[in-house]
Amino acid sequence: MNEPLVLGIETSCDETGVGIVRGHTLLADAVASSVDEHARFGGVVPEVASRAHLEAMVPTIERACETAGVRLDDVDAIAVTSGPGLAGALLVGVAAAKALALGLGKPIYGVNHLAAHVAVDQLEHGPLPEPCLAMLVSGGHSSLLEVDDVTVGVEPLGATIDDAAGEAFDKVARLLGLPFPGGPHIDRAATSGSSVYVDFPRGLTSRKDLERHRFDFSFSGLKTAVARWVEARERAGEPVPVADVAASFQEAVCDVLVRKALDAATTRGIEDILIGGGVAANSRLRAMATERAADLGIRVRVPRPGLCTDNGAMVAALGAELVARGRTPSALDLPADSSQPITTVVA
Ligand code: KG4
Ligand code: ZN
């Protein structure tokens, strides 16, 4: 029998993603991004994102089907991000998915965006190790999760108590005069800078903080430290060494992320770490995690950058796994839930 053919729709933030997956095989991953429309605001504007999703939805579905060489009739199930994310943006995807499911007479799965970030790695590296420790780092979230079966649930171990990791990259990039979204620009600038130029603070790593927040993150203090450092330079009339500040900031973020992920994996006796979300595209994070984990006999899996940022393939990948494991679909009146808890995989 053929593995399930699933179409996945992602609209939780500023990417309209439509992916088509057969089992663990990626057939199409069409993404239309409204990121350029938000750039001048320095962050995603929800209303602008919703309108862009509406305009991009049908052409992106058509493009995905064309690339995959399938007709909508061939699809066995529709999966869609039901949350968490921007309410208006989610609604566009959920409405489109319902229309498809109803029109085609196929089941619909409203899935958790974070679980989809985990499931996507199956498309690149095969079945997920069970259990695995997932570190999801993006513009909207930074969490450490224990995943035993991604179709059933994930256990949150820790999360950011203020800014998300990607948010910190974006804000610091702005301070340094780099364009939005800042992560890739900091990554690039850092390659020619010194990571030990400034010793920026590592949030929530003091002994006292570890008692209450062992697996939690905090990046707002780091962002403030960078701002103060840059201001002091500017007040003194000295040029800001952008590459060095970018490299030192990036080192501080990666150091904390990797330390806490490894601590969590060791404590829980988990031998596989999966990193996902937009910040997982960061070259220093990938290198540092792989290097330090190897010393502890821990394996690290990171999907290729295009699968780390938001896309439809990740939603289709989770959908295909739900179908393959015989999980119950959502009701056709499923809601878009902007604060869908990470423990709810299928809405
Ligand atoms: O997962 P994603 O596409 O969207 C959200 O769900 O937020 O992540 C976008 C975030 C942005 O903050 C962006 O600056 C960051 O991921 N990002 C990076 C890199 N590429 C994207 N951060 C650091 N280094 C990168 N290479
Ligand atoms: Zn995301």
Image: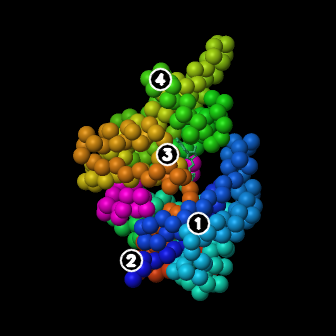
Query: Is the distance from the Cβ of mark 4 to the nearest ligand 1 atom less than 8 Å?
Result: no
Frontmost of labels 4 and 1 is 1
Q: Which amino acid does label 4 sit on?
A: Ser
Q: Earlier in the sequence, mark 2 or mark 1?
A: 1
Classify 185 as above or below 45: above
Q: Which residue is drawn at 55% across and 30% down?
A: 189
In the foreground, 104 or 135:
104
SS assignment at label 3: helix
Question: In whole angstroms, how far apart are the C-alphas of marks 2 and 4?
Answer: 48 Å
Q: Mark 2 points at which residue?
A: 325
Q: Which mark is residue 195?
A: none
SS assignment at label 4: loop
Q: Which class describes the residues within 10 Å of circle 2: few (<14), some (14-19), or many (20+)? A: few
Question: In whole angstroms, how far apart are the C-alphas of marks 1 and 3?
Answer: 24 Å
Q: Residue at x 49, y 34 (%)?
A: 250
Question: In whole angstroms, how far apart are the C-alphas of marks 4 and 3?
Answer: 20 Å
In the foreground, 262 or 6:
6
Query: Is the distance from the Cβ of mark 3 to the nearest ligand 1 atom less than 8 Å?
Result: yes
Q: What residue type is labelled 1?
A: Thr
Q: Mark 4 points at which residue?
A: 194
Q: Residue at x 66, y 73 (%)?
A: 96
Q: Which class describes the residues within 10 Å of circle 1: few (<14), some (14-19), or many (20+)? A: some
Left or right: residue 134 versus residue 241 is left
Q: Mark 1 points at which residue?
A: 67
Question: In whole angstroms, how far apart are the C-alphas of marks 4 and 1?
Answer: 43 Å
Q: Position of residue 308 (x, y in %)?
A: 50, 52
Magenta residues (range):
121-143
Classify 334 as above or below 180: below
